[in-house]
Image (cartoon, rainbow, N blue to C red):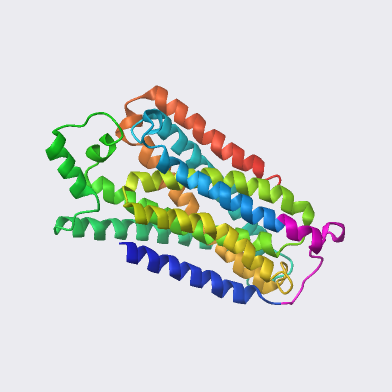
Amino acid sequence: MASNLLKIICIFFLISMFSVQVLSVVEECGEEEDDSCIDKKKALPLKIIAIVSILVTSMIGVSLPLVTRSIPALSPEGNLFVIVKCFVGGIILGTGFMHVLPDSFDMLSSSCLKENPWHKFPFTGFVAMLSAIITLMVDSMATSIYTKKNRNGVLPESQGDQEMAVVNNGHSHGHHHGFKLDVDGSQLLRYRVIAMVLELGIIVHSVVIGLSLGASNNTCTIKGLVAALCFHQMFEGMGLGGCILQAEYKLMKKAIMAFFFSVTTPFGIALGLALSTTYKENSPRALITVGLLNASSAGLLVYMALVDLLASDFMGKKLQGSIKLQIKSYVAVLLGAGGMSLMAKWA
């Protein structure tokens, strides 16, 4: 499974590299930015600060659930873990609806693009819809494939460890190892598929976001964007880290997934920085490429937030058994989505 994950991640990096080649065009259209805010020399240190700060906050966010699992209040079985996960689900949902999707609409409806076909058909909604359907297909088929392998005798990682723990201990002792003992094989497979699909979706839109920031020399927008991205990466990382924790991967796979999440946005910023002399934000090809990538990312993120993160929890036994916990979780979702909506003012 590790090799499959690495292959898929490499494919997405190749796609991002291809998009960079498409973005490297010098054709311009209209006024690109306010000249009073354009300062390449002042923008450079801001971009370096952005790379370091986003890398650090991403590492903290994705690692936090993995290193605090031994704390009873933060264990996957605790109420606090569910509430935080719902808060992060709201953040990812807000990212899709309030940041990525509007950006795609703006780009694909730009006056820099030809009237036909870009102003004759809502490509953003169409691509986002297709992306959500394709994500559903991948989600469903991956679950079916891994379930079939499990039925044929291929045990998921650490399931054997769970069975040995049951034999040796006879029962759960109530501490953090209890999580392993309470998850059956089919649910564990489900957690792993969710973690993989969410990771891939985050990688795609993180590269695009980083590329846009790195290529921009507008100091007026970079400062606010850096703060918003640090907030976003911290809590999005916590959501991914929680999914990785529930998936019960071995240490190496946890480290690989955490590493790729942490470096994709800084990688995109560095790539945009290298292309800042040739990349023109308002060139037609750049608008089309980034607009379509944003639309596909939005569809994926909205699907993952609603279906795999929120619906699975709210329809699960834990939340269905407690109206009080449901209300707290709803408030957490609204706070997360509201926070990202507020951030849309600056980013």
Query: What residue occupies the far top of the structure in this picture?
Result: 324
- Of residue 70 and residue 2, the one placed in the foreground of this image is 70
Q: In which quarter of the image is residue 246?
A: top left
- For the point 65% across and 46% down, the residue is 228
Identified at 59% across, 54% down, the residue is: 100
Position of residue 232 relative to residue 320, above or below, is below
Quarter where residue 275 is shown? bottom right
Q: Give the extent of the magenta segment.
A: 26-46
205 displayed left or right of 181: right
In percent of width and height, residue 200 lies at: 45, 59
Side of 52 relative to 87 (left or right): right
Q: Residue 336, how many percent across, how many down?
A: 55, 38
Who is closer to the viewer here, 281 or 29? 281
Q: In this view, does 165 lie to the left or right of 282?
A: left
- What is the number of callouts on the image? 0
Apparent side of residue 182 relative to residue 324 in the rendered image (left or right): left
Q: Determine if the magenta segment contains residue 40.
A: yes
Task: Classify 322 as above or below 194.
Answer: above
Rendered-image quadrant of the N terminus:
bottom left
Evaluate whether residue 60 shows in this view. yes
x then y, percent, for residue 298: 53, 55
In the image, residue 238 sits, relative to residue 117, either above or below, namely above
Percent across and percent down for residue 106 are: 67, 59
Residue 116 can be seen in this image: no
Q: Residue at x 66, y 75 (%)?
A: 24
